[in-house]
Image (spheres, rainbow, N blue to C red):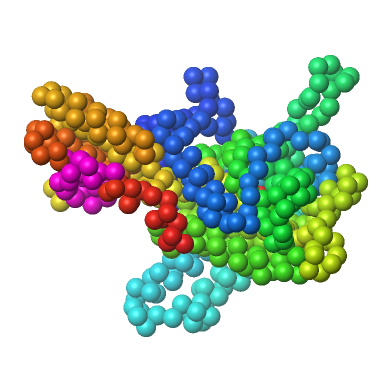
Amino acid sequence: MAKQEDQFKKVLSHAKEYGYVFQSSEIYDGLSAVYDYAQNGVELKKNIREYWWKAMVQLHENIVGIDAAILMHPTTWKASGHVDAFNDPLIDNKDSKKRYRADVLVEDFREKINQKIEKDITKAKKRFGDAFNEEEFRATNQNVIRRQKQIDEISAELTRVQEESDLVGFKQLIVDLGIGCPASGSKNWTEVKQFNLMFGTQIGASAENSTQVYLRPETAQGIFVNFLNVQKTGRMKIPFGIAQTGKAFRNEIVARQFIFRMREFEQMEMQFFVKPGTQKQWYEQWKETRLKWHLSLGMGAENYRFHDHDKLAHYADAAADIEFNFPFGFKELEGIHSRTDFDLSQHEQYSGKKLQYFDHEENKSYVPYVVETSIGLDRMFLAVFSNSLQEEALDNGTTRTVLKLPAVLAPFKAAVLPLVKKDGLPEVAKKIIEDLKWDFNVFYDEKDAVGKRYRRQDAAGTPFCITVDHDSLEDNSVTIRHRDTMDQKRVKISDLKEIIKQEVDVKTWLQKM
Ligand code: ATP
């Protein structure tokens, strides 16, 4: 745990030091769980968004995008169920005065038991080598069986108290499990209360004429209310999807995990409209497609896992998370939900307008079913950033800090470095920049010894360094250094564009899907 915490602290300080993420309004001591993306962060975030958009919209002829407003008619949120039910159960510790989400306390407790199982499995794997059979081990090892039983019992009770909104039972579960305050260890808890996560505000000048509206807590509803507009004007045939990226706001109870849980964040969502009865098949297909998208970035298959929901939201007939191995353990990165016809039917009912699709093949109208993929852009940023940050021991006994961002996502693709600040080298370097900047973000740096500049670019995540030396004046060649391997090669200046393109091109990466 201490090692994980250390790694997480490094992620935080590195994100600030290298211009990725700043605390919002830092000069006023910050605003809790709100962050600003800095000069490098904004580029990384934009590249992740684009990587998603290309995979989801550009490469699917039956998926189109929209950009709906953040403010929507307030009835939207009545229809969607958010006014009545977008609640989290909160609990306070009377001694430490810290506030927690009751479900997260229980989930974290359960995860600790799971970690123990994983540890036993890793140990046994080492001991038995190739002969190890995980399935058999899980089925026969007494410690694992006992722990798994405990996990299943906790899950069942957690599902029950959530489904029945049994707040007394929720508190009892925390007490029975002996869960203490993570900050202080105290078990002196208040009752569990429900807390609505929507931020409200007013439209209108005077108090009497103003209308209560909400900052959208998810982007999905902007898609549902536009379903028919898009279907008709785009002449879309089912199955088809509508995608959107944009800000969402939630007044999160506990927001202590940097950009993992923010009060203002960005989502990338896609609602896929299908014929009723086919939703299961599309749900499975989108689970697979989305996992492939993640894997295409090369961040290690072992860092992802599916978590199928035991507790389904009232609108869903199947739901799973893609969890990622964050510095604080496996946590939800993306959700894939089979939402039935709940949303469109609700909007039909509340608006009095038909939101149906006329299926020519079937010769009838119906309310389509929806399979949704929903990922947090900021969480994806954290996954990429934390996974890429590495300390590497070098042959000469020193270490280097390197941010091994997938090259396709890196803010700057290359840094151009004149070996010295004179003799016409900066001029050649600037000419290279002039040429490359039309295709890539490139960075110029002439300060300090070149070794130091390499380290700076390694830590900033730049995949290539291009060094201009005195020979360049004669042979029109430069040294190109690769961030990950540190290999250096002499190449023609005229070949640079192609060399960089091969490694950073979206096509090269997405074709791995
Ligand atoms: P959690 O259980 O972690 O609160 P959720 O199940 O409420 O998440 P969804 O409503 O399914 O999340 O939202 C879809 C995605 O949006 C999540 O998978 C996550 O990546 C992202 N997301 C949700 N809430 C936040 C937040 N407060 N900050 C950053 N990203 C978020």
Tell me the residue at 50%/58% (across/down): 293
Q: Position of residue 87 (x, y in %)?
A: 74, 45
Residue 87 against residue 361 in the figure, above or below: above
Tell me the residue at 69%/61% (across/down): 239
Q: Which residue is situated farthest in the top direction here?
A: 206
Count of numbered tags: 0
* Along the viewing direction, whichever of 277 and 354 lies nearer the viewer: 354
* Along the viewing direction, whichever of 170 and 228 lies nearer the viewer: 228
Q: Position of residue 97 (x, y in %)?
A: 63, 35
Q: Which residue is situated farthest in the right direction here?
A: 352
Quarter where residue 426 is shown: top left
Is residue 142 inside the magenta stretch?
no
Q: Position of residue 422 (x, y in %)?
A: 13, 23
Q: Is residue 254 left or right of residue 115?
A: right
Tell me the residue at 32%/52% (across/down): 502
Q: Is residue 194 left or right of residue 301?
A: right
Tell me which segment is drawn in magenta. 478-497
Is residue 481 inside the magenta stretch?
yes
> Residue 108, can we see it?
no
Tell me the residue at 84%/39% (across/down): 75
Q: Position of residue 261 (x, y in %)?
A: 57, 42
Quarter where residue 298 is shown: bottom left
Q: Is residue 353 left or right of residue 99?
A: right
> Residue 122, can we see it?
yes
